[in-house]
Image (spheres, coloured by chain):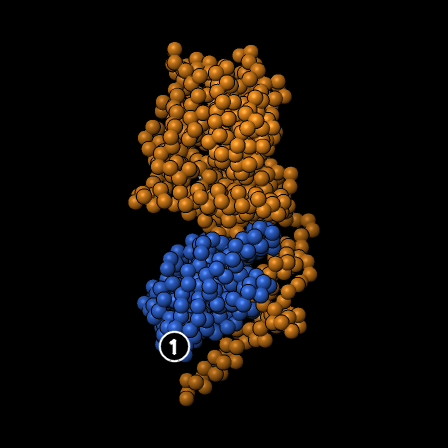
Chain colours: A blue, B orange
Amino acid sequence: MRIALFVTCLADAVFPDVGRATVTLLERLGHEAVFPPTQTCCGQMHVNTGYQREAVPLVRHHVEAFEPYDVVVAPSGSCVGSVRHQHAMVARGAGDEALAGRATAVAARTYELSELLVDVLGVEDVGAYFPHRVTYHPTCHSLRMLRVDDKPLRLLRQVRGMTLLELPDADQCCGFGGTFALKNADTSTAMLADKMRNVVASGAEVATAGDSSCLMHIGGGLSRLRTGTRTLHLAEILAATA
Amino acid sequence: MGHLRGEQSFPDAARGALADSQLRRNLGHATTTIRGKRAAVVAECDDWEELRLAGEALKSSTMARLDQHLVELEERVTARGGVVHWARDAHEANAIVTRLVRETGETEVVKVKSMATQEIGLNDALAEAGITAQETDLAELIVQLGGDLGSHILVPAIHRNRAEIREIFLREMPGVDPELTAEPRRLAEAARLYLRERFLRAKVAISGANFGVAESGTLLVVESEGNGRMCLTLPETLITVMGIEKVVPTWQDLEVFLQLLPRSSTGERMNPYTSAWTGVTPGDGPQAFHLVLLDNGRTATLADEVGRAALHCIKCSACLNVCPVYERAGGHAYGSVYPGPIGAVLSPQLTGVEDNASLPYASSLCGACFDACPVRIDIPSLLVRLRAQHVDANRGGVPSPEAAAMAAASWVMADHRRFAAAETASRLGRLLGRSTGRIGSLPPPLDAWTGSRDLPRPPAESFRQWWARERGQGRARERGQS
Ligand code: SF4
């Protein structure tokens, strides 16, 4: 299958390994990954901070970049959530019904990585090998906006050599929330502290999730505390082999 | 007047609460317990999602014809010997209630726990008129005696622990046993003794209402302790203040709400006390009944076809108990009698966004509130909408640094060439984390991030550069030929 990669602006600029891992994984499974070069950002930060008007050009740009493809995948629950739940709304808010219709069509073909693998490609065993103790944090938007359920866990359970450890209070928000982390830095930090305590209590060497943004938050906290626990995106674990 | 707006912004008010480790322990403990109870009783219902959908649908259709239902309610209440008053705002409502109490010649009233009367600041207004209002709900009593504000819709004294309650009772309850311990049983007993006297001498009671049934003119209060029922039955005069959104068209509608409310609220299958009264009944219960129908910003909220969903709220407080922000910052940080996620959307809508501009941002948009809400209010979407209204209201004039940054980011990201150039420029950030591979401090406003977290050092090569190098047009053709 020919699959368009929406790498997301964060992975492109800060976590290119996540994009590379997604490509490696798709190619290993026998699919063709393409990178629509005009893509930039889904505009989620603008929408969630109240700048819907500023998000309109980004929505239009995103629709134009991905319209030619039948299947689009992003290694980010929150960006797919934005495409699916916000793009048409933003277009409609700007009075552009035509754009809203096009955005809805693109959204219907856009999948988060675990959705693509399990629902579209029908695989749970991706042939990965990762001999480490891992715990999984189900990020809020994957969990509640996309309802990916246990798809990431089903994929992780098939990884050879890996010990999957339970994360206490897993479904509690890590406190990132985009600009929330800046606007309410104290509350965000208090939420992060509890998430880190639970990650450490799980006994894992690696905390994983389907969103680079939440991992940047959790990883940034763990690095400050020198806990030794690392964060890795789900795609990086699934792409790992012996 | 009223208790809907805070003096401090949410982040400022939260800072104090976050620094209070006792408060955080109390809140964390209480919300964890009630979350567990709620989850267990919700799991028992295999039709829970259908019930939620039914609740949502009933609320939407009722709001669409609220005027008709209210007129019907007024007719039925009047026909059964009650008197209906309409209050546009807190000031009018307080004036009506004060006048009604004055007309009885009494200077003391007992109160059933009610959010509407707190919203309008009724106790303060009565005090100004020389009338003492005695709260009879245990948690509300603790807050009242402590000279405090409620911190939770259902459990206003959630932020207090037993030792603190004991101290408040010893200090504020005349004639309390000086040997009082902090045992819950002993504390409840002290409150009961204190309240019994007041129930017996009260001639006037003031309540709110959880529901008002239009077809029969019946008002309902649900509660756990039974103290409300004492107020609703013993005094001669009963005055009920009800927000206009609390009306339900028929008795049958209650079947849905009386299942949704207790499970979501206290984690019980059924609330222990449900009191319903219709006008006055000669020889039984209060012989004078007044219903004050309160608007106070509700009609304006109703005019917003998306925002009006906030009025569907049945004040169960489930969204507070699951909210990670509420759990850390506590109810006082919201500066309103309606704290937590629902407060963050309701208070700004009732008073105008600019009056509570920081509240819509007091959420990480994690979505736990929507999942918990028994009437499926999409609180995260309402928050995002209010943020947009706030931003739009501040357009024109000199843009704030944030607005300028957002506009610049939009410009850069609307074109991939500009975006790629910005990525290259940001790689200058590599200079910062050279020795450690991470960035530990940044200047304002980004120090809000690096205060507690490191930032990863920008990579040497962006994904798009890697792609162009490895899988780009030229390469792909090359590979295709080989
Ligand atoms: S918004 Fe929903 S969950 Fe929150 S108090 Fe109201 S009814 Fe309950």
In terms of depth relative to the viewer, which is nearer, B404 or B172? B172
Which of the chains bears the disc numbered 1? Answer: A
Position of A146 compared to B11: left or right?
left
The residue under the point 43% across, 13% down is B287
Q: Can residue A127 be seen in this view?
A: yes
In terms of depth relative to the viewer, which is nearer, A79 or B404? A79
Quadrant where ligand 1 appears: top left
The residue under the point 55% across, 28% down is B179
- Coordinates of residue B230 in the picture (x, y in percent): 44, 21
Position of B435 compared to A50: left or right?
right
Residue bearing the label numbered 1: A28
Label 1 beta carbon less than 8 Å to ligand 1: no
Q: Describe the element under mark 1 as helix, strand or loop.
A: helix
- Coordinates of residue B119 in the picture (x, y in percent): 55, 31
Q: Is residue B407 above or below residue A7?
A: above
Residue type, mark 1 in image: Arg
Q: Quadrant of residue A74?
A: bottom left
Quadrant (top left, top right, bottom left, bottom right) of the C terminus of chain A: bottom left
Q: Is residue A193 above or below residue B237?
A: below
In terms of depth relative to the viewer, which is nearer, A145 or B397? A145
Q: Is residue A11 above or below residue B33?
A: below
- Coordinates of residue B130 in the picture (x, y in percent): 62, 18
